[in-house]
Image (cartoon, rainbow, N blue to C red):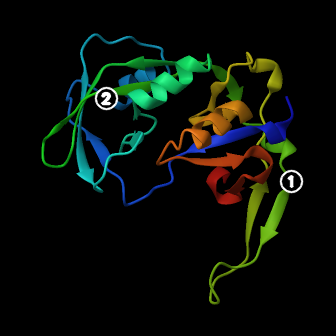
Amino acid sequence: MNNSELYLLEDPFSSRYLRLHLVSEWINEELAEKLAYGQKISSEAVVLNGYMGGPVADILWTGLPPMFCVSKKVIDLLEENHFTGWSTYPVEVSDRKGNKLPEYYGFAVTSYAGERDKSRSPIVEKDPITESGKKYSVYKGFYFDEAKWDGSDIFRVHPCWLIVTQAVKDAFIKAKIRNVKFIALPDEETSTLVYS
């Protein structure tokens, strides 16, 4: 598949929609990662409450990446299209007032494609963001070892980059899935300071 037909699926960091924080004390960072990557199955629901924002959306992001929740609308969409590379885990979600929000699921990305390959991304110098700022450098484009990708429609690149195919992106847009951002891999820019 052409790199331009793959997209990063990202948190848009919208202050409008409800954001969640972890309430369950039995979850630590390591266990959160295992749940979010489908490496552990839990019969006990992970409890998450709203801490900022207001309206609910189809995707609810948390203060503990890579955990996030999706609505039944998202699950139905993925199942109807037979998209691969994902699973769910049980969650109990409440809004900021403590009202339970039924039919949300913890979302796990089960397919893994190794690490990012920075050597294939040219370093590009960017103009300052503000008048008083300085120029800065970015890695332009996102690459990974395609040989390690199993072809799933949704997959992860270490440590927690989530990537989807064009078909997933198109389905989300057509269904008007809210509170998500897509970036085509060739357009992705990461500051070189992240890796310094």
| Pointer 1 local density, CA inside 10 Å: few below 14, some 14–19, many at least 20 | few
Label 2 residue SS: loop
Looking at this view, name the residue that lies furthest to the front: 174
Q: Residue at x 64, y 83 (%)?
A: 133
Between the residue at mark 1 and the residue at mark 2, the CA separation in whole angstroms equals: 37 Å
| Pointer 2 local density, CA inside 10 Å: few below 14, some 14–19, many at least 20 | few
Q: Nearer the viewer, residue 104 or 36?
A: 104
Look at the picture and state if 111 lies above or below 174.
above
Q: Residue at x 53, y 26 (%)?
A: 77
Q: Nearer the viewer, residue 77 or 39?
A: 77
x and y percentages locating residue 39 in the rendered image: 47, 14
Q: Quadrant of residue 191?
A: bottom right
Q: Residue at x 36, y 25 (%)?
A: 105
Is 175 positioned to the left or the right of 15 in the image?
Answer: right
The numbered mark, 1 or 2, whose residue comes first in the sequence reads 2
Q: Residue beneath label 2, please?
A: 28
Label 1 residue SS: loop
| Residue 108 at least partly seen | no
Q: Residue beneath label 1, please?
A: 122
- CB atoms at circles 1 and 2 under 8 Å apart? no
Looking at this view, name the residue that lies furthest to the left: 98
Q: Quadrant of residue 1?
A: top right
Q: Which amino acid type is marked by label 2? A: Asn
Screen quadrant of the C terminus: bottom right
Q: Which amino acid type is marked by label 1? A: Pro
